[in-house]
Amino acid sequence: MGFLRNTKEMLLHAQREGYAVPAFNIHNLETIKTVVETANELRSPVILAATPGTMDFAGRAYIQAIAETAAKLHDIPIALHLDHHTTYESIFESLQLGTKSVMIDASHKPFEENVALTKKVVEIAHEYGATVEAELGKLVGQEDDLTVDEKDAIYTDPDLAVEFVERTGVDSLAVAIGTAHGLYKSEPKLDFERLAKIRSLVHVPLVLHGASGVPVKDVQKCIELGCAKVNISTELKIPFSNGLRDYLLVHPEETDPRKYMKPAKEAMREMVIEKIIMCKSNGRV
Ligand code: 13P
């Protein structure tokens, strides 16, 4: 058995104790190490989220192996989670490699098709001891190649959410309540009432996507209202890139990745600390 976990116990514990497990999007060895080492320092459970774009970029087997090594080296709960995967085939490939936590995102499809594909993924994932997150509703913004315009955004319908969870058997549900992937042009207005209603009807842990740029108080309110997993991507990419850019601007002659990656990792580390504290997941291990 590998060292990577599925997210069942992690999310149920967070739900019971009133915090959220942060899911940080990672892209390579540097970002995985930064996230895991920082989570370990803060004694926080952590989810490493990899989109199809990341798998294409870094290689599915490489990401799996690096995450597995990270989980072996640290005694905190660590899950590698497939973020926004849209096909059965890509998920199956990762299940065979040992991934224990997957998201099937068929939220762009009509309801019945979303149910059918999600159910199919749940059946195979559970056979492999993996947990499944799915999404109902549509978030604005861009994640990998999936782009949703403002006019096409759909908030999660609480009654449909109940039906969706019952019919698919998913382990967690990503909800659309006004957050977006990427940064915001103005402060987002979240539909807390809708979230509370979903929470009162649906009993699996809820997932908040698009947390970058959402004020801390709003994310924490979502956690209080039942979001047990909070996804953060853009806000980690920014300090990593800034750290790298700033260093190379001052040292344009530098060619050693071991030198110029350092400030990028350090800047990202600061943000990981901030987000772990926002999720109140520090000191939970
Ligand atoms: P942000 O890039 O807005 O943080 O969204 C992350 C996300 O939801 C990944 O699934």
Image: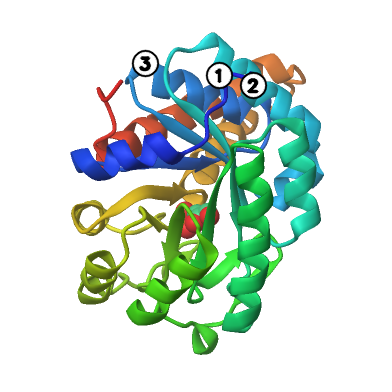
The residue that disc 2 covers is 68
Judging depth in this view, the residue of 249 and 55 nearest the camera is 55
Residue 41, numbered circle: 3
Mark 3 residue type: Glu
Image position of 209 with respect to 148: above or below? above
Residue name at image x 47 percent, y 72 percent? 164
The image position of residue 234, as x and y in percent, is: 51, 51
SS label for mark 3: helix
Q: Residues within 10 Å of mark 2 (few under 14, many from 20)?
A: many
The image position of residue 58, as x and y in percent, is: 78, 36
Q: Nearer the viewer, mark 3 or mark 1?
A: 1
Mark 1 residue type: Ala
Coloration mode: rainbow
Q: Sequence order check: which comes first, mark 2 or mark 3?
A: 3
Image position of 133 with respect to 109: above or below? above
Mark 1 vs mark 2, CA separation in Å: 5 Å
Q: Is residue 52 left or right of residue 39?
A: right
- Mark yes or no: residue 267 visible: no
Image position of 209 with respect to 185: above or below? above
Mark 2 vs mark 3, CA separation in Å: 18 Å
The image position of residue 100, as x and y in percent, is: 60, 36
Quarter of the figure with residue 10: top left
The residue that disc 1 covers is 71
Judging depth in this view, the residue of 204 and 44 nearest the camera is 204
